[in-house]
Image (tube, rainbow, N blue to C red):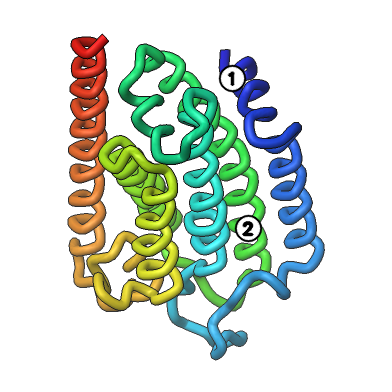
Amino acid sequence: MIKFYLRIENHMLTPHLLSIITLIILAFNLIIRISPTNFIKLPQSFNSRYTGLIMPTSLFTYCDVYLLVLFIILMFFFLGIDYETSMEDIALASCGSKTNKLFARKLAAIISLYLVLYTITFVNIYTLYISLIDGKGAMIPVADILIFSATTNLFVFSLSLFILVLSRNISVSISLITAYYLIEEALWRCKITKSNGILGHIYNYSNYTVGKTYSVKLLYILFSFVLLFISYKISQRKFSLRGHRN
């Protein structure tokens, strides 16, 4: 079923779009593998006597920012572009029509492809970090890396779906996600949210007290499920309203 919907999505916006994106991401991983020092950042003071814990900033940047934002934008378009040609009606069509099953299956398909490419990129960059710092330092615990990354992905996907079904406008949804996540959290390095930001672990890890790391992430996880629940209720409400109108 997932392959079937991926084939549909592969030709939605332009022929073989997903195939091209997949090849580009795989090629990028190969380039990083060949020349890791040009893409992976290590602390400026990194040397044979470096004793601090190393934050894999490049790992989070490539996986949890660039790759995630790319697929969030693709998700916005794929969830509704075949229902209406008007950008303003795409979200309403996808969440308020009788095609909720198609909506869910297309979402599952694009997330499945994302998880495959994410895993490849994550493992590639993580193993390169290990080889680059071998004997010279240590990264933060792998459990922390996985928790941070999983929480970030869950929250951003949940927030994106919530904005989509609430605004009913893909252009607005893209603008809001870009302003909040790409600009404020990533480019501005949590200038407003600071250590409480969803990417606060990248720039403020050393400022966390014992236990605060997990408490902040737990709040984001709970908030993510709340957003998913509200998004589901909003979509059901729009479905009922359209059903009565019809």
Q: Is residue 168 left or right of residue 186?
A: left
Q: Is residue 95 left or right of residue 10?
A: left
- Residue 46 versus residue 113 in the image, above or below: below
Whichever of callouts 1 and 2 sits on the residue coming sooner in the sequence is 1
Q: Residue lying furthest right in this view?
A: 34
Comparing 73 with 136, the one in front is 73
Instruction: Give me the residue at 79% from left, 60% from top.
Output: 31
- Residue 71 versus residue 129 in the image, above or below: above
Query: Viewer-nearest of labels 1 and 2?
Result: 1
Q: Return the x and y of residue 216 as percentages of the image width and height.
A: 21, 58
Q: Which residue is mark 2?
A: 125
Q: Which residue is mark 1?
A: 5
Q: Is residue 221 left or right of residue 138?
A: left
Comparing 39 with 134, the one in front is 39
Quadrant location, the C terminus:
top left
- Residue 227 versus residue 35 in the image, above or below: above
Instruction: Give me the residue at 58% from left, 42% from top.
Output: 119
Which mark is drawn over residue 69?
Answer: none
